[in-house]
Image: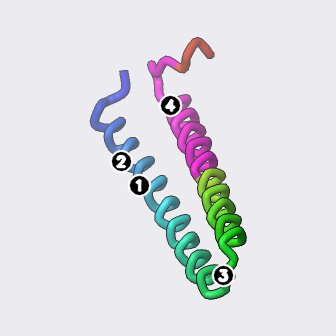
Amino acid sequence: MPDTNDLSKLQEQLFDIVKKSQDAILDAGRVFTDRVSAMAPGDSAQLDDLIDNAFDMTERVLQSQREFAKKMVETVTSQLPGVDRGGDE
């Protein structure tokens, strides 16, 4: 059975990696927003498109983060003895 202290450290490292990548995405989003707001047209339909595009980008980023986190956990847990991987053994 894996040591719970080791698992806790592993969780913290994983969360730290995810947090850092999310912070980087937020920073990129802020830069994007700053640049777009300087160019934003007065037409509300075009503003709606900008909003939709921003949220579409955010959804893709979140999906990517979810997949990354799952792959990270799968990779790490596959190396730990005694971890049930859902019948893959």
Q: Residue at x 49, y 17 (%)?
A: 84
Label 3 sits on what residue type?
Gly
From the image, tell me which residue sits under label 2: 12
Distance, label 3 to label 1, CA atoms, is 40 Å
Observer-side mark, 4 or 3, equals 3
Mark in the foreground, 4 or 2: 2
Q: Position of residue 8 (x, y in %)?
A: 32, 39
Residue type indicated by callout 4: Thr
Q: Amino acid at mark 2?
A: Glu
Please report contact status of discs 1 and 2: CB closer than 8 Å, yes or no: yes
Marks 4 and 3 sit apart, C-alpha to C-alpha, by: 52 Å
Q: Secondary structure at mark 2?
A: helix
- The x, y position of residue 36, in whole percent, is 64, 80
Total tally of numbered discs in the picture: 4
- Mark 3: which secondary structure? loop
Residue drawn at x 36%, y 47% is 12
Task: Evaluate if marks 4 and 3 touch, with contact meaning CB atoms under 8 Å apart.
Answer: no
- Magenta stretch, residue numbers: 62-84
Residue highlighted by disc 3: 42
Q: Earlier in the sequence, mark 4 or mark 3?
A: 3
Closer-to-camera residue (35/10): 35
- Quarter-of-image position of residue 9: top left
Which numbered tag is attached to residue 16? 1
Secondary element under disc 1, as helix, strand or loop, is helix
Q: CA distance from mark 2 to mark 3?
A: 45 Å
Among the 4 quarters of the image, the one containing residue 19: bottom left
